[in-house]
Amino acid sequence: MLVEINNKKYNVIITYKNNKNMYLRIKDDLNIYITAPKTIKEKEIIKFIDNNIISITKMINEKEKIKNSNKDKFLYLGKKYDICYTNNKDVIFGTNKVFIGKNVIPENYLKKKAKEVFNTYFLDCVNNFDEINYVPLLKIRKMTTKWGVCNTTTKTITLNSDLIKIDIKYLNYVIYHELSHLIHPNHSKSFWLLVEKYVPLYKTYRKEMKNILWGYYDKRL
């Protein structure tokens, strides 16, 4: 399905689930993603889009604006650097610029740094977490909707590799958030009290993270 907004055509990708309501998201590819109940008809989806066209337009414009602002930028630990390519083999950080060797692939460099940084912070948080006496398995991968995931069955915590692009305080929060799920596999009051024990400002961080847009998507936690 295609929808025209301000003389531009956008793909509408529909996923049918056992939901009671419809949900809409705009992702990095600027496609319109809709999750709809299995019983709903296409004309109702079209009406849903028409009724939310102002919000959809605003979201698309915001995505495009941020994507353009981050073009040719290097995001690392909460700071935005201008990229300068050099003949060196390394990545060297300046005050506002990062000097990257021509043969260096920025995303590969960030993946490598994510592994190094995440492992260090993860072990520090686990050692400080009094409620468990073992080290959960840590996985790192790119995710499009979440900052972290905890599998309580396998005792595995997965961190979004894009956390390397934002302030380290958010990584710290996500780790404690997921560790707390090993004790409370829900979002109950007891769960949030445990999170607060280790991250007193978690409410502030959680709110800030919901507003973080790196030019391609927003993520939930």
Image: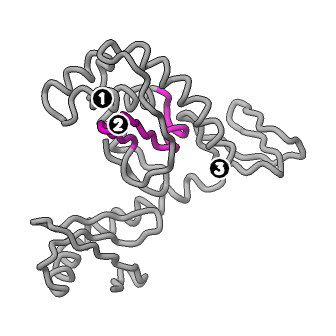
In the picture provided, is 133 more to the left or to the right than 118? Answer: left
Q: Nearer the viewer, residue 44 or 7?
A: 44
Q: Is residue 189 magenta?
A: no
Asked whether the beta carbons under mark 2 and mark 1 sit within 8 Å of each other, the answer is: yes
Q: Residues within 10 Å of mark 1 (few under 14, many from 20)?
A: few
Q: Which residues are magenta?
A: 147-168
**Residue 71: quadrant of the picture:** bottom right
**Coordinates of residue 58 in the picture (x, y in percent):** 33, 64
Residue found 19% across the figure and 72% down from its top: 36
- The kind of residue tagged 2 is Glu
**Precedes in sequence: disc 3 or disc 1:** 3
Q: Residues within 10 Å of mark 3 (few under 14, many from 20)?
A: few
Spatial CA distance of label 3 from label 2 is: 24 Å
Q: Name the disc covering residue 208, or none.
A: 2
Q: Secondary structure at mark 2?
A: helix
Q: Is residue 166 magenta?
A: yes
Spatial CA distance of label 2 from label 1 is: 6 Å
Q: Secondary structure at mark 1?
A: helix
Q: Nearer the viewer, residue 171 or 79?
A: 171
Residue tagged by mark 1? Answer: 204
In the picture provided, is 102 more to the left or to the right than 94? Answer: right
Q: How is the image coloured?
A: one colour
- The kind of residue tagged 1 is Thr
**Coordinates of residue 122 in the picture (x, y in percent):** 48, 25
Image quadrant holding the C terminus, namely top left
Between disc 3 and disc 2, the foreground one is: 3
**Residue 181: quadrant of the picture:** top left
Q: Residues within 10 Å of mark 2 (few under 14, many from 20)?
A: few
Residue tagged by mark 3? Answer: 107
- The kind of residue tagged 3 is Glu
In the picture provided, is 77 more to the left or to the right than 57? Answer: right
